[in-house]
Amino acid sequence: MNKAPMTSASLGSTPERLNAVCDAQPFITRFCIKNLRTGEVFERGADEEAPSASTRKTSIMMAALKAVHEGRLDLNEQIVYEARFAEEVASGMFRYLTPGIVISLRDAITGMMVLSDNVCTKMVFERLTLEEVNSYCQSIGMVGTHHRFLIPPLALSPDHSLKSVTTTTARDQMFLLQSILDAQGSEEGSKRLGVSQALSAYALQTLKNQILRYAIPSRLPFGTVVAHKGGTGKRGRMNAGIVYSNGEPLYIITAFTDQVPQDMPDGTPGYTVSLETIGRLSRVCWDDFRA
């Protein structure tokens, strides 16, 4: 006799399925997820501070765009790639290129976001200050986010303290992405972020241009539009993004793994399983929210 096909409902409710994905692993997974069709929010440790890794770069981008809107920075400013920018850098491709290349601030923001290039991050962040970026986050409501370094030290140990790095929360990152989404076509929403509508549109498109397709997009159909920014930390992996279906935003998911072991009991690298965990969380949302 043929068995009835398994459905999402037969596998448990959305919260049960999300928590089961997390409970299956020995490390910590925090998330904040919003079904944009219904407004429902699902969360786990959403207000607990965690290492931000490169998810912090979305707020750096927005602080820079605020400075552009105020006339303090110019997206067309020409920046020379100097050899010093490649020091203590472990991500992106610019560190392998020949110094002397000239790019615009706009292109530096692009490199910082779509390839997580830390040479480009230095180019952008040197035109701001930690205090400025921190103040920006606090002013828009990201109360659990604290920028502490231009670029985190490479020699950090896997058990480093939270005060050794920039920290954020899953809720803060969801709030930021929701704010960027709300600002599309909304002058009031853009003003809340301190930018113009054109700069709000630029920010969202830059997130959509993300080239790295691990974590949130990894288990979604090929070609699914995801506006997101990931992060690689010594304590775990993280990803924060907006997932689209049929041209419309379907859900926001921000997920942060922490205290991830270097190797799992079966020898699989811990980071591999942490990224897969985020991908599985995203797939639960894809299956349930489109139903």
Image (spheres, rainbow, N blue to C red):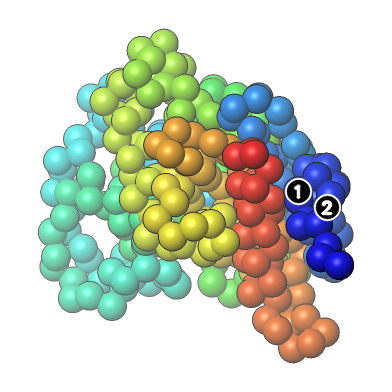
Q: Label 2 crowding class (10 Å Cα cut-off): few <14, some 14-19, many 20+? A: few
| Discs 1, 2 touching: Cβ within 8 Å | yes
The disc at residue 11 is 2
- Say which residue appears at 57% left-offset and 61% top-offset: 219
- Say which residue appears at 74% left-offset and 60% top-offset: 258
Q: Quarter of the image holding residue 83?
A: bottom left
Q: CA distance from mark 1 to mark 2?
A: 5 Å
In the rendered image, residue 53, in percent from the top left (x then y), is placed at 57, 57
Q: Quarter of the image holding residue 48?
A: top right
Q: Is residue 69 visible?
A: yes
Query: Residue 288, relative to residue 11: is it above or below?
Result: above
Q: Which residue is most to the bottom?
A: 267
Q: Secondary structure at mark 1?
A: loop
Q: Which residue is most to the front?
A: 1
Query: Residue 244, relative to residue 213: is it above or below?
Result: above
Give the quadrant of the N terminus.
bottom right
Q: Which residue is mark 1?
A: 8
Q: Quarter of the image holding residue 71?
A: top left
Q: What is the three-letter code of the residue carrying label 1?
A: Ser
